[in-house]
Image (spheres, rainbow, N blue to C red):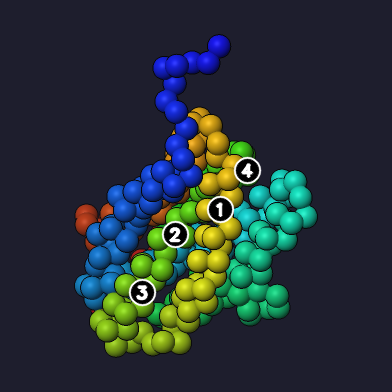
Amino acid sequence: MHDLSAPAPLSPDELEAALRRIGAERYHNLHPYHRLLHGGRLNRGQVQAWALNRYYYQSSIPAKDATLIARLPTADLRREWRRRLVDHDGDAPGTGGVARWLKLAEGVGLDPAYVQSTAGILPTTRFAVDAYVAFVRDRSILEAIASSLTEMFSPTIIAERVSGMLANYAWITQETLAYFTPRLTQAPRDVNFALGYVREHARTRAEQEAVLAALRFKCDVLWAQLDALHHAYVAPALIPPGAFTPEQT
């Protein structure tokens, strides 16, 4: 028998609206650390800590995407998702988003070899990013794709980040922030596919609730990383043993 007490499925437009509400409430552009970063209120060491820890997230994205590609059932889907690997890993050494982020880290004064070692990242950064990779590996394909939909909100934060950092930090250049330029076209392209997939395949209310939970989880992953940065490098400024310690200036 049909359960009359169960909530009716959302329409695709209602589901998309619910996804966008999650971003409006939970996306990490709202986090105090990002407000400080964009507003020019961090010192060089605090900016370095952000770049260093964010590298672990950026460099883990291709591994996350590779686990999903391995589970996608059709060549069309695999080809679509494979573009993300090229975007981040590049198609030759020194190309792609991960390499550009390494240049960003170098541009703010970090040793690239130290950044790549990930030796100085915060424990919460490692736990949160590893949890995201595991989520995409272990959950349903629908949930894994839905978790990527934080990209719906990334053009706004990229615009804020680039304009704010260039305006407020004399030692940061356009070249330093070159990572972000391709993302302004890559992210909307990726969203068009992922959002279309979710709108089409999340048909039952249970599937739709799983999709919404996946996006909330991903927002939490991003938020937790900034919580850790704020706790370690702003207030109360308690840096965990072994983590990056900025030079005193």
> Where residue 159 is drawn, which disc sits there?
3
User: Which of labels 1 and 4 is toward the front?
Assistant: 1
Instruction: State how far apart marks 1 and 3 are (Cα).
Output: 24 Å
Mark closest to the chain's N terminus, 1 or 3: 3
CB contact under 8 Å: marks 4 and 2: no
Residue 161: name its quadrant: bottom left
Q: Amino acid at mark 3?
A: Ala
Element carrying mark 2: helix
Q: Which residue is mark 4?
A: 141
Residue 207 location, x and y as percent?
Answer: 53, 34
Q: CA distance from mark 1 to mark 4?
A: 14 Å
Residue in front for this viewpoint, 9 or 66:
9
Quarter holding the C terminus?
Answer: bottom left
Q: Which residue is mark 2?
A: 152
What is the CA distance from the residue labelled 4 to the residue labelled 3? Answer: 30 Å
Sequence-first disc among 1 and 4: 4
Q: Report how far apart the C-alphas of labels 4 and 2 lie in the structure.
A: 19 Å
Residue flagged by tag 2: what amino acid is it?
Met
